[in-house]
Image (cartoon, grey):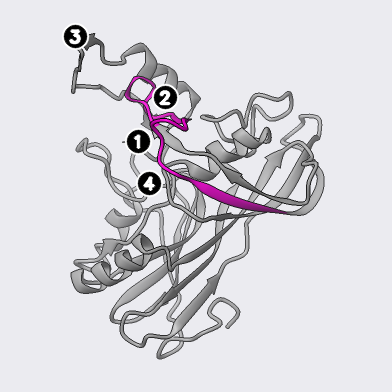
């Protein structure tokens, strides 16, 4: 099978989950675009006596996701999926924010829980635990950074160097939520590696082609929006990224999605103790 280099148990049973339960939903932290950020800024909490007001109202409505989740592998302990772009990983706190990876899968695998998340606009490999014990074991691997992740992305412009490291601490800023910021003083350490695959041009609809660079991205840490803000810091934002400059250049405004895909995931199966390497080709 090309997906799993190390195979677990019986051959994977492939299922297609339709886009049922796709509603107009309120987006959660991983589902903001530029307009959303502006909405947040316009309704940002005010400072009173040095304290931040806790109530923030999010009015952003995400479009329905009619794309399917593809189940690439399943056994009694875990499920490996290909998440479509434009789908929340986890339903939001607002009751209207229903449709998500978890919402769809829990109806097929009762009791399943997310081990990690992908941003709303990111597609690709996600690992789902089928019980609490497996979730704890897999989460420990993520926290100990023994899980290896690789992404493919299209960056705006042509990178000068063929490879490099972005080492820039990332901080949360409540006044700018959901935007993250680069801050060496208050930020948490964050490190990403990039490697150029090819340089070329990309056209959207009838827009003029824009220069892009296809890269492999390897995050060594797992901060919120890490790859997106690190690519912006590099001077080459991810094409289609509303939050961090990926739709600012002429010809990029109508890019239909965030051009970021989780293409490889390596972890140790909690039961068999075999090292698993999963790969899923980028759709762009």
- Pointer 1 with pointer 4, Cβ within 8 A: yes
The numbered mark, 4 or 2, whose residue comes first in the sequence reads 2
Q: State the mark number for residue 27.
A: 1
User: Secondary structure under badge 3?
Assistant: strand
Question: Which residue is disc 4 drawn over?
Answer: 88
- Pointer 4 with pointer 2, Cβ within 8 A: no
Give the spatial CA distance, label 1 vs label 2: 9 Å
Question: Which residue is disc 2 drawn over?
Answer: 36
**Which label sits in the foreground, 1 or 3?**
3
Question: Which residue is disc 3 drawn over?
Answer: 48
Q: State the mark number for residue 279.
A: none
- Residue 237, percent from left and from top: 63, 35
Give the spatial CA distance, label 4 vs label 3: 33 Å
- Pointer 2 with pointer 3, Cβ within 8 A: no
Give the spatial CA distance, label 4 vs label 2: 15 Å
In magenta segment, residue 220: no
């Amino acid at each position: 099978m090309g997906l799993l280099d190390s195979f677990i148990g019986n051959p994977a049973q492939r299922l297609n989950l339709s886009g049922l339960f796709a509603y107009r939903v309120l987006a959660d932290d991983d589902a903001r675009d530029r307009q959303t950020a502006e909405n947040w800024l316009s309704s940002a909490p005010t400072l009173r006596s040095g304290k931040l007001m806790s109530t923030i109202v999010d009015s952003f409505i995400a479009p329905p996701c009619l794309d399917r989740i593809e189940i690439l592998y399943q056994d009694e302990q875990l499920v490996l999926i290909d998440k479509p772009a434009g789908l929340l990983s986890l339903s939001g706190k607002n009751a209207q924010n229903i449709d998500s990876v978890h919402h769809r899968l829990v109806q097929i695998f009762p009791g399943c829980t997310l081990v990690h998340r992908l941003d709303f606009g990111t597609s690709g490999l996600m690992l789902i635990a089928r019980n609490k014990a497996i979730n704890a074991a897999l989460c420990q691997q993520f926290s100990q950074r023994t899980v290896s992740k690789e992404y493919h992305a299209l960056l705006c412009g042509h990178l000068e160097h063929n490879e490099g490291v972005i080492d820039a601490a990332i901080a949360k800023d409540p006044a700018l939520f959901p935007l993250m910021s680069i801050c060496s003083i208050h930020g948490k350490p964050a490190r990403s590696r990039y490697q150029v695959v090819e340089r070329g041009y990309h056209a959207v609809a009838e827009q003029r082609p824009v220069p892009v660079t296809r890269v492999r991205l390897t995050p060594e840490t797992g901060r919120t929006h890490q790859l997106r803000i690190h690519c912006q810091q590099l001077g080459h934002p991810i094409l289609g990224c509303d939050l961090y400059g990926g739709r600012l250049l002429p010809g990029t405004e109508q890019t239909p999605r965030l051009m970021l895909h989780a293409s490889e995931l390596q972890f140790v199966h909690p039961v068999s103790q075999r090292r698993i390497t999963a790969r899923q080709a980028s759709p762009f």
